[in-house]
Image (spheres, rainbow, N blue to C red):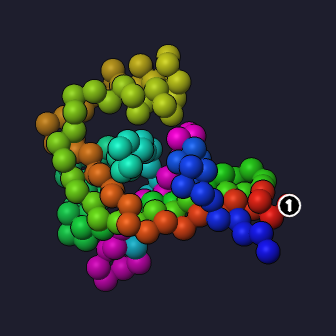
Amino acid sequence: MTTGAMTPAEREAFLAGVHIGILAIDEPGRGPLAMPIWYLVSDGAVHISMDGSSLKARLLRAAGRATMTVQDEAPPYKYVSVEGPVELVPHTPDNLEMAVRYLGPELGAWYAENNPLTDDSVVAVLRPEHWRTFDFGKML
């Protein structure tokens, strides 16, 4: 029987595409916090920029782990879900790469210029331990 699981190469190619991720973080006393995010994959890790004083950053520091899910909303559907430990590190002074990835060169440059990083900006680095993937196109 054919399975829809992605190979590591298929998973990497899918994540290299432009998709909005959903970051899920444990929030004690409530359901998990699930927020849409922009992301980059570099050196096998998922990088997510944020303000270091944000709720996301505070919960990530406390939980030390997170899950990110990325999906393709056009048939045949695909998704990748990754879970693992997260470390928050100081942000590099350039946020142009992420903005251009999601908004294109012109709007990305405008966004990066008008939304500068602050001294409190951080990057959450999620190091994958567990993957779940599926490509429904493989079932056709």
> Dot 1: what SS?
loop
Choose between 3 and 100: the one closer to the eye.
Answer: 3
Q: Residue furthest bottom?
A: 29
Is residue 39 shown above or below 31?
above
Q: Quadrant of the C terminus?
A: bottom right
Is residue 25 shown above or below 127?
below
Q: Quadrant of the N terminus?
A: bottom right
**Left or right of residue 100: residue 30:** left
Q: Residue at x 29, y 79 (%)?
A: 28
Choose between 48 and 106: the one closer to the eye.
Answer: 48
Q: Which residues are magenta?
A: 15-31
**Left or right of residue 59: residue 132:** right
Q: Residue at x 20, y 63 (%)?
A: 61
Provide residue 100's location: percent of width, then percent of height.
46, 26
**Left or right of residue 76: residue 126:** left
Is the residue marked by circle 1 packed among few (<14), some (14-19), or many (20+) residues within 10 Å?
few
Provide residue 45's location: percent of width, then percent of height.
36, 50
Q: Residue at x 38, y 61 (%)?
A: 128
Quadrant in which residue 41 is drawn: top left
Magenta stretch holds residue 81: no
Give amino acid for label 1: Leu
Can I make out residue 98 in this image?
A: yes
Q: Residue at x 41, y 33 (%)?
A: 98
Q: Which residue is mark 1?
A: 140
Provide residue 15's location: percent of width, then percent of height.
53, 47
Provide residue 31's location: percent of width, then percent of height.
41, 78
Is residue 33 shown above or below 110?
below
Q: Residue furthest left?
A: 119
